[in-house]
Amino acid sequence: MADIVLFHHALGLTPGVQAFADRIRKHGHLVIVPDFYEGRTFASIEEGVAHAEAIGFGRLIDRAIAMIQPLPSPVVVAGFSLGSLPAQQLAQTNRGVIAAILYHGGVPAETFDAPWPAGVALQVHVVDDDAWNDMDEVETLIAQSGGQLLVYPGTGHLIADSSHADYDPEIADEMLLQTLSFLGAVDQLHG
């Protein structure tokens, strides 16, 4: 079973993020969910993003990564939306990372001044018509990494967070199923 570090989104460590982590844990995986907002949560994505901007995205990514040091190895990193940034940076720069799962986004590899590393598996989950996601950036990352892109129908953003208005239980179930399948494949390769 994989050790997973799951980074929360711009609303903070919400009950919905914890619930998704718990669903993964029920399948035998260890899931660490650092709270890089230090207990703060926000009611809207706009408020959460404004908080992240006030801290600075680079500083926030550094804070998130520092919270889980030393990083378990081997490890799978994952992130929801804003949390996909520290997950992706770790995947590209830390040799102990064997796979990454990005929910609701991803950026081109050059964002972190490193190519996507050979042998690090990637799975990205996005919603087809998501105003907070740049599909061109995600498709660039997929082309650079050879990763798997899963696109779900709809217009919401935080569709896997059961505590958010965008929550879609059917899509969240499918995301979980795809996540578990991916983790199973990663376990077989690195077990």
Image (cartoon, helix red, strand yellow):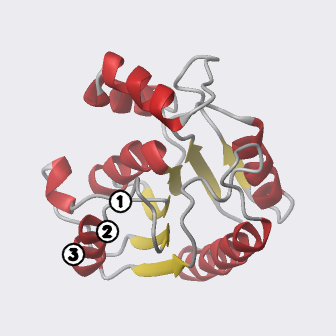
Could you tell me if residue 88 is visible in this image?
yes
Residue occupying image coordinates x 14% and y 57%: 110
Residue at the image point whose x is 59% and y is 53% from the top: 158
Mark carried by residue 144: 3
Task: Determine whether 74 is above or below 1 in the image.
Answer: above
Q: Are marks 1 and 2 in contact (CB under 8 Å)?
A: yes
Left/right of residue 63 with respect to residue 151 in the rendered view? left
Mark 3 element type: helix
Neighbour class for label 2 at 10 Å: few (<14), some, many (≥20)?
Answer: many
How far apart are labels 3 and 2 at the CA level? 10 Å
Q: Quadrant of the N terminus?
A: bottom right
> Where the C terminus falls, by quadrant?
bottom right
Which of labels 3 and 2 is toward the front? 2
Q: Residue 69 shows which numbered tag? A: none
Q: Quadrant of residue 129?
A: bottom left
Say which residue appears at 54% left-offset and 65% top-offset.
155
- Ranked by sequence position, the earlier of labels 1 and 3 is 1
Residue toward you, 5 or 56: 56
The amino acid type of the residue labelled 3 equals Gln
| Residue 140 position in % (x across, y down) | 22, 73
Q: What amino acid type should be assigned to the residue bearing mark 1?
A: Gly
Q: Circle 2 sits on which residue? A: 138
Alpha carbons under labels 1 and 2: distance apart: 5 Å
Residue receiving disc 1 = 106
- State whether residue 60 is above or below residue 111: above
Measuring from the top left, give residue 157's x and y in whole percent: 54, 56
Q: Which amino acid type is marked by label 2? A: Val
| Residue depicted at x 57% and y 78% | 153
**Nearer to the camera, 115 or 161:** 161
Mark 1 vs mark 3, foreground winner is 1
Which image quadrant for residue 24? bottom right
Q: Which of the marked residues, 1 or 2, is nearer the chain's N terminus? A: 1
